[in-house]
Amino acid sequence: MGSSRDKPGTDQKSNLFLADKSLYDLIQELSERKKMQFFRPIPYVHYRTCTLVEGEVWYIYFYVQDPATGRLKRIRKKLNRISPCKLRRRVARDLMNAIDERLALGWNPLIERQAPKSYTKLFECFDSFLKIKKKEMEKESVRVYVSYVKIIKDWAQKNGFSEDSPCTSFTHEAAVEFMNEVEDNDKISARTYNNYVRFYHGLFKWMADKGYAPGNAFEGIQRKPRRLMKKKRRLFTDAELTRLFTFLAKENKEYLAMCMLTYCCFVRPKELALLRCEDVDLARQTVHIREDVAKNDKSSYRTIPNDLMPYLSRLDLSHPKWFLFGKNEGFDFSPSPETICSRRFAAYWNLVVRPACGFGMDVQYYGLKDTGITNMLGRGVPISFVQQQADHSSVAMTAIYVGKSPSAREELKGVDILPD
């Protein structure tokens, strides 16, 4: 067997490969370092370090960027009161080092005047925002807020922001860069992108209002146009409805009742999760959507059609204060004293219903509400009644569903509108 010594060039190729790999690693490291420095203040652009002047008046001066003009402005701090001169010089040196460190982290006394809390740590400010919102909002909404804050924290840590970075370090440039990265994610839809913009604009507006920032870093970042946000769901066909209701009648009577309430009474999933047994009045054939449950914060009553009554009569309503569709093991949606996250409804739809019924991704749970409204209008129910049942703010909103049915109207087939 010949050794590598018998094959000249083998070691050279190996060394060349290692050299290339080392160069690649170095380039990667330099690239990461550059990325980490991207949002840090730049000397002579955003600030100039301290200089000591000794004379009749001793003072330190440095420059920071004026947020109003964008130009560097000189700041002076006098030292004459400190004596003797030897002590004054030592204090000046320590003060200069401390100021230079703060300037490198993004501190700006001009901004601090406009926003007294601007030197608060960025991540601590985010946590304060969440702490306040937890007192004001429902549990489900808080969970969404926590998720959004985690996303921007993770991005900030990957892009050079440390736990000590002040609020002022997150500039408009950083906000633009963050949203560019969100936009580049193929999994993010136009609707989700707009939700990002809406949330972070609100978060940084709160920071500005509370004195953590001189302005809103997300101000001016535009949302995606409405034409890109078209809902990707369609109406159910009669065959699909029959397939769905037949399957659930055998497999899950609570989920069937849930679907029926959405199809016939137009109750939204988040409203379903907060309904209590006492909200269903079988004697009067009504479902009460309380103001603390409704999407629009207004109380309303939905009529239970006769065809829906048998499905609701099968539910256990013996505990008035229990949640109608509660939290239990697995996909058991029977009444419970503990509320359930509405995402659990979607999980059952995607993991069980969709494959069992052979539904594509365009057949979505919320399509039951659209289909119910469309079919009710198609059956000749007055639009004002449908408006009340759907809890729409105007007839115009309900009228959007007119004409969505793929079936031709018999009344229009015989219309004679051509000239003689």
Image (cartoon, rainbow, N blue to C red):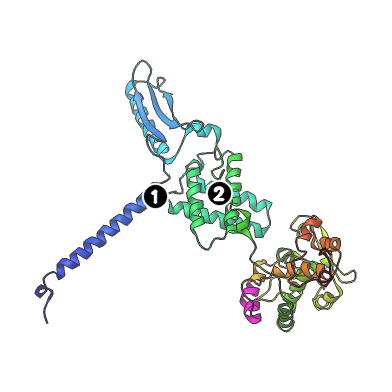
Which image quadrant is residue 213 in?
top right
Please provide percent x and percent y for residue 317: 81, 73
| Residue with the most extreme front position | 420
Q: Quadrant of the C terminus?
A: bottom right
**Residue 206 painted magenta:** no
Determine which of the numbered discs, if any, sits on residue 36 in the image: 1
Residue at left offset 41%, top offset 43% = 40
Q: Which residue is mark 2?
A: 126
Q: Percent position (x, y) of residue 220?
A: 56, 43
Residue kind at label 1, given as amino acid type: Met
| Image quadrant in which you'd find residue 368 | bottom right
Predominant SS along the magenta part: helix
Q: Residue at x 76, y 55 (%)?
A: 297
Which range of residues does the magenta coloring cover?
347-360
Answer with mark 2 or mark 1, whichever residue precedes in sequence: 1
- Disc 1 packing (10 Å; few <14; some 14–19; many ≥20): some
Q: Is residue 91 above or below residue 374?
A: above
Q: Is residue 356 left or right of residue 172?
A: right
Task: Work out whether residue 402 can be spotted.
Answer: yes
Comparing 79 with 215, the one in front is 215
Q: Is residue 359 magenta?
A: yes
Regarding mark 2 in the picture, which secondary structure is present there? helix
